[in-house]
Image (cartoon, coloured by chain):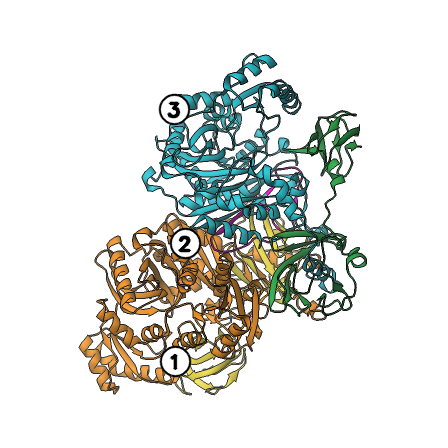
Chain colours: A orange, B cyan, C yellow, D green
Amino acid sequence: MFRRILIANRGEIAVRIIRACRELAIESVAVYSDADARSPHVALADRAVRIGPAPAVESYLSTDAILRAARETDAEAIHPGYGFRAEHDAFAAACAAAGLVFIGPPAEVIARMGSKTAARALAAQAGVPIVPGETPADQRDETIAAAARRLGVPVLIKPSEGGGGIGMKTVRDEASLMPAIAQARREAAAAFGDGSLYVERLIERPRHIEIQVLADHHGGVVHLFERECSLQRRHQKVVEEAPSPAVTPALRERMGGAAVALARAAGYRNAGTVEFLVEGSGDEARFYFLEMNTRLQVEHPVTEQTTGVDLVRAQIAIAAGEPLPWTQDALQQRGHAIEVRLYAEDPARHDLPQAGPLLLYREPSMPAVRVDSGVAEGGEVSVHYDPLLAKLIAWGETRETARRRALAALRSYPILGVRTNGPFLCALLEHPRVVAGQLDTGLVDAERGALVASLSDELPPDAIAVALAASEPATAAPRSDIDPWATLRGWRG
Amino acid sequence: MFRRILIANRGEIAVRIIRACRELAIESVAVYSDADARSPHVALADRAVRIGPAPAVESYLSTDAILRAARETDAEAIHPGYGFRAEHDAFAAACAAAGLVFIGPPAEVIARMGSKTAARALAAQAGVPIVPGETPADQRDETIAAAARRLGVPVLIKPSEGGGGIGMKTVRDEASLMPAIAQARREAAAAFGDGSLYVERLIERPRHIEIQVLADHHGGVVHLFERECSLQRRHQKVVEEAPSPAVTPALRERMGGAAVALARAAGYRNAGTVEFLVEGSGDEARFYFLEMNTRLQVEHPVTEQTTGVDLVRAQIAIAAGEPLPWTQDALQQRGHAIEVRLYAEDPARHDLPQAGPLLLYREPSMPAVRVDSGVAEGGEVSVHYDPLLAKLIAWGETRETARRRALAALRSYPILGVRTNGPFLCALLEHPRVVAGQLDTGLVDAERGALVASLSDELPPDAIAVALAASEPATAAPRSDIDPWATLRGWRG
Amino acid sequence: MADGQGSGIRDPGSGKLDIVLLGRGQYRIVDGSRQRIAYAAGPPEARWVFLEGRVYVVDTVRLPSTTLRPGKPDTTYVASGFPGLSVVEGSRTDTPARTRHDDELALAAPMPATVAAIHVSPGQEVETGDLLVMLEAMKMELPIRAPRAGRVKAIACRRGELVQPGVQLVELE
Amino acid sequence: MADGQGSGIRDPGSGKLDIVLLGRGQYRIVDGSRQRIAYAAGPPEARWVFLEGRVYVVDTVRLPSTTLRPGKPDTTYVASGFPGLSVVEGSRTDTPARTRHDDELALAAPMPATVAAIHVSPGQEVETGDLLVMLEAMKMELPIRAPRAGRVKAIACRRGELVQPGVQLVELE
């Protein structure tokens, strides 16, 4: 086992990995930019190394700075978390070249699965269903249109490069085809500097369901069942759960088998996720390969809470060369877990990311509720990075119990000083289709207007009364909005 | 299902039950004495009713005050928690007479199992092994000695009434018999006002292992496997775990079967625990009925974390007349859970209970760690009640993972202002016999001297430096030891 | 709205609302025998309040003159410790003290950001929700969308420009 | 004890200990590239410190005169912000600043309590750990045991009496 691991990340995932290291008696090394000098991940690690100024490109994205920190602290391995350099094959290769173990798959596997075309080809080879579609080599508008007509409307036109839903167009009749192609190309060129387009059959009201896999260095590959992540806003997941309300045992076995077959075909190692679009539900549902994420997912805790497997610990053990300790038959789902992602963003203003001080921040502590966070009261949410503050994961014997627990916990989770999507998540968890488990990837965007409207009541008298009580001079002493740093600048070392 | 439940308790267990009610959309009513007006259980409930002054006998033990509160708030059921009136048959009967559902077994079952003699007789009838012993009707010293000689040394002489280990004497040779009887009688008379003695065969270095049972009103009875509670100091449990390192599948089945047989013989309803002394380990171990606790146990979370069953929710559902939702076969243990009890007490001074302000109190928040607590920073630990502050429960795929997690969590759990057994628990969790799972009920008392000695180091320089840093005038603003109440007396309503 | 109606959490005839400080920023609202927990923090002109999963930002400096007035004891809720100050039950039509949702702000950058792309030209007609400008602050894309239908009057930023929060980027007419 | 030895958490040659306030009562101790988190609260004469699962009560009023002195930079650890004040590495023999464990106190009530039973008489010989007096504070039994072997000189309480903390209940000779 490793003696010391450097964590090339920040926020909640860095904290999560530090905790896993501590339990394994492995020393943890945090890295931080100037903007994060006082962040929880820096305080919690056994060592912390400054790697640059606030811009990620000069700190968390800088391979040089990270490898230098690893050398300085004599680290043996690097855990990349998710985001930043986690799916960057050149970073994995640089780690290997520097004699460091990259806790993830080999660089060539990252590269192959990172190319949509290569990943689709490999999936097709491995017998995994894919959504019919292509990136025409000849990129003239007429050729794109011809490809779309061959697939048959409705189709999806999207940039070959980039993501986040930008430039993606749905075409439901052939007459709209040419204008949609032109507009998609303009948006793709503006956003990504590349106007190449891809056409694909549109799966109507699909569910997003993914399979977690683990592969060791001894030929062992298992899957840890599914997570449903259909609740997305503009292609970003906000609520995830396991198991999926749409997946039957037979479908689970087929999807799990497909994911394992793909992982084997790819020569996969460590933890990875095979994402599928699912049409319909039950035994008859059809599923199509979407992409493979060659890293730990944000939503990994719902798998941990239902399978009992610690995925970060498993990643470290696999990277250290240990064989998987379970066969497929030994793994089981128990109960139901729901994760909600708490973002610093304003749902009333198109989810614009928010920055500001965490004047008050108290995590709920209750049975069967887990909070993975990377912030603390008195801290600052900066403009520099992803606005994810924390993830709240509720487990229950049934989906309904987990849902009620998540709601009860959100209502005991005050975050003041920056707007968050907490109130929106409460409203979403009470939406009749969410209650019933009738999910698809369009649900949040379709219902967001109604959900946001339900949040913009006038101020209740109780809130006014509390606001006034807090403002009385007599309460000055316990006020929590005083900046503790301001008073300390004189003496801090 | 009930619309409103009154919780006739305080502290962490009242908080636990309030949370269960909230998830079930049942209104919760807290009761409190003057000493608890600002306690977390009072703040968390939907309603709170003052039931009397600080002394428990005039508040939490007062059947009249509790029933009056239930009437005033229109509660339909009463959850007694543990302690106070939880095993008081007259209280259960008074609830029933007042038309309130008592969330627990019927009064006559509490009465029967509360009598050591009746419970032993019932166990024997049900085919459950008991430790050979008797309370001689003729209580003269000579008759007691004769009974002891019939059983054969080593024997245990103990008061028929009372508990907590007071007046209990171990006799290893017949010569010591008469002086031990005399001393036991003096101590029993002084402590309980009754000098009656009971003699019993001594089980050497036993383990304390108990079986959780649930029985509904429709003939359904299941067990939820075992908890090992051998780590006790002077007969009070401090660390509990599930499963027991000593229990094999065959032994588990025999013990579970015995517990279910006893519950059926007793006409048991709701949650209960059958305690056993276990001699040896593995398939060949022998177990003896000790007593049945007719209520929720302090250590119920280790069962919840390993079986996935919410015992408080199950108690409420059973009381509402619902049938058990599982068969015995559907229940399974997964992984390992360890609970440590955090008491306000000073291990260096014979565990004397401590009272004082919680100047600083921060609960750890990490995956697979649960904290059930009834206190908050700024609160006061009073002299009036049990000094249990909180329970920390760590789960892991293996016992060793759970143990390391419990340790990591205790090291991230600062409690300042009153001494607690936290440091002692850390030392105990690192004791070689605890690491190896070689437990018996004498371990803590035998090792306490060495464990306490390991804690009385001199002050490390880091602690001095932090103490001085905190005392600098520049840090006055963030000091947490200011009494927020003092500044508020002028305006609070 | 009759006494005891409204949010449905009040005892008829009580009329008294006690606010008790529990700990830093944590308050208990006691209304007869019923109660709930709330949290508050922030300066008087933007006091943040958390109440049962909802967040409100209250300007307590301007509040008393607009929404608070001495009330009759049988129809108002008196916050203890503020004698002479009563909170009148709000209604949908006469509540100037709203949380700060200002649609105009939707046309300004929410934080320091770079203009990644401009998707409209002066004179162009836009529908509610149309993408006008794409900003970028480090990893995040911040779309600026039309808060209402209209015609683009002017564009007040350039591609690549670093814009400051609160500065309007597009004018609609 | 050589520099860098001892607790085994220090970089040789560093010698500087930075204490950084993270939040209310929470501190980061930075020692070269290594670090740990500590918590502190309480008045100067009884400052509570939590460090890796251990709790210390430090009298910072009396501390400087007994355990702190200016140190040579290469052999001492300097807490930043306290120029001229250095913390000398302690050892088992020369550390007067101990946590407050006073065995004498073992013969006094730890809190207001009622005397439930007296188990010894004047003149009686007792062994370490023998039960002398049983106190009761509500539900709890508080045994007062002999902190050392000796002979009971006097008993300073009566059965049923309410005793105050700190008052010695039994005298041993």
**Residue B216's x, y, as percent?**
38, 33
On what subunit does the disc labeled 3 rest? B
Q: Is disc 2 placed on a helix, strand or loop?
A: helix
The quarter of the rendered structure image containing the C terminus of chain A is bottom right
Disc on res. B127: 3
On what subunit does the disc labeled 2 rest? A
Q: What stretch is highlighted in magenta?
A: B362-388
State whether residue A55 appears in this view: yes
Crowd rating for badge 2 (residues with CA inside 10 Å; few <14, some 14–19, many 20+): many
**How far is the residue under mark 3 from the one under mark 2?**
40 Å
Does residue B168 show up magenta in the picture? Answer: no
Disc on res. A305: 2
Who's the residue at 39% across and 80% down the image?
C126
**Residue D144's x, y, as percent?**
70, 33
Disc on res. C126: 1
**How far is the residue under mark 3 from the one under mark 1?**
83 Å
